[in-house]
Image: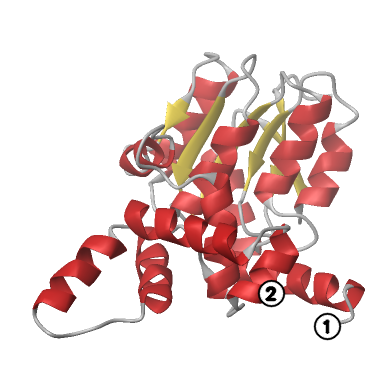
Amino acid sequence: MSDKPRVIIAEDNPRDREFLGSALPDYQLQFTTNGREALHAAQALDEPWVISDLQMPEMDGIQLARELWHERPAARIVFWSQHQDEIYLRALADIIPPETVYGFVLKNNPSEILARAVDAVFRETQCWIDQKIRPVQARANKTSGGVTDLEYEVLIDIALGLTDNVIAKRRYLSRRGVQSRLKSLYAKLEIDQEQRVSENVGETMNMRARAVSVALRRGLINRFELEQEEEKLKRWMAREGLS
């Protein structure tokens, strides 16, 4: 039996699995192809070590982390992804247990950086955050000026093309409540300031479309997550008899 530390890998890309194998020779790597397989493997361990991609079939990296940390708060996870979208940093901020350490390293780094991040988290018990991630993380974690979960919900809804009436029904709000959240969202994304400027020069813009555009550029929403939200919407509409 190998005396190397065991690390569970959640990665669906064969090329990336091969890279991990060559970059981390000091670890015994157990490869899985999605978050669900990785979760099952990790549940057999008291304090599992995991390296996980974010976007995967069956169960993505955020869902894996949420369920694993719920059962094993001391589990250590290094997120290894090509994505640095704010949506993921927001989600992580809500689920990281206080008793664990974790890492976030981008896939475009050389193997030396990956190995340094993995060693920091697993061997040195230190958090390791990619320098390119830190500004996005700081913005996502802002207590003032940051988009709240309630504002994020309405952002998803307008990105899916829902009307105020449907948003109100889905989120158990009045129309006035929907409009209040939208107004707050526009302010956080600084759409309200743009609108005032455009009105001064005799122009107008669609604020809903503008909010979606700004959110896409900031990484608050992305195609992968919108596809997941589209499936949730279809299920909700079917339950409500709206499909």
Disc 2 + disc 1, Cβ < 8 Å: yes
Residue 107 seen in render: no
| Numbered circle sitting on residue 242 | 1
Residues 232 and 168: in front is 168
Query: Where is residue 234, by image quadrant?
Result: bottom right
Secondary structure beneath label 1: loop
Would you say residue 162 is visible in this rendering?
yes
Q: Is residue 107 above or below residue 43?
A: below
User: In the rendered structure, which disc, 2 or 1, sits on the residue that comes first in sequence?
Assistant: 2
Which residue is rendered at x = 17% and y = 77% of the image? 199
Residue 64, above or below 175? above
Closer to the camera in the image, 201 or 237:
201
- Tell me the quarter of the picture where residue 50 sits: top right
Image quarter for residue 122? Answer: top right
What amino acid is at disc 2? Val
Q: Callout 2 environment at 10 Å: few (<14), some (14 to 19), or many (20+)?
A: some
The numbered mark at residue 114 is none
Q: Position of residue 231 (x, y in %)?
A: 76, 72
**Residue 126 percent location from the top left of the image:** 49, 17
- Estimate the x, y position of residue 93 in percent, counting from the top left: 54, 34
At a point 70% along the width and 23% down the height, the residue shown is 4
Q: What is the total number of numbered labels drawn onto the structure image?
A: 2
Classify the position of the N terminus by image quarter: top right
Q: How is the image coloured?
A: secondary structure
Frontmost residue, 234 versus 174: 174
Q: Quadrant of the C terminus?
A: bottom right
Task: Measuring from the top left, give residue 181's x and y in whole percent.
Answer: 50, 56
Image point 46% across, 41% down: which residue?
105
Residue wearing tag 2: 166
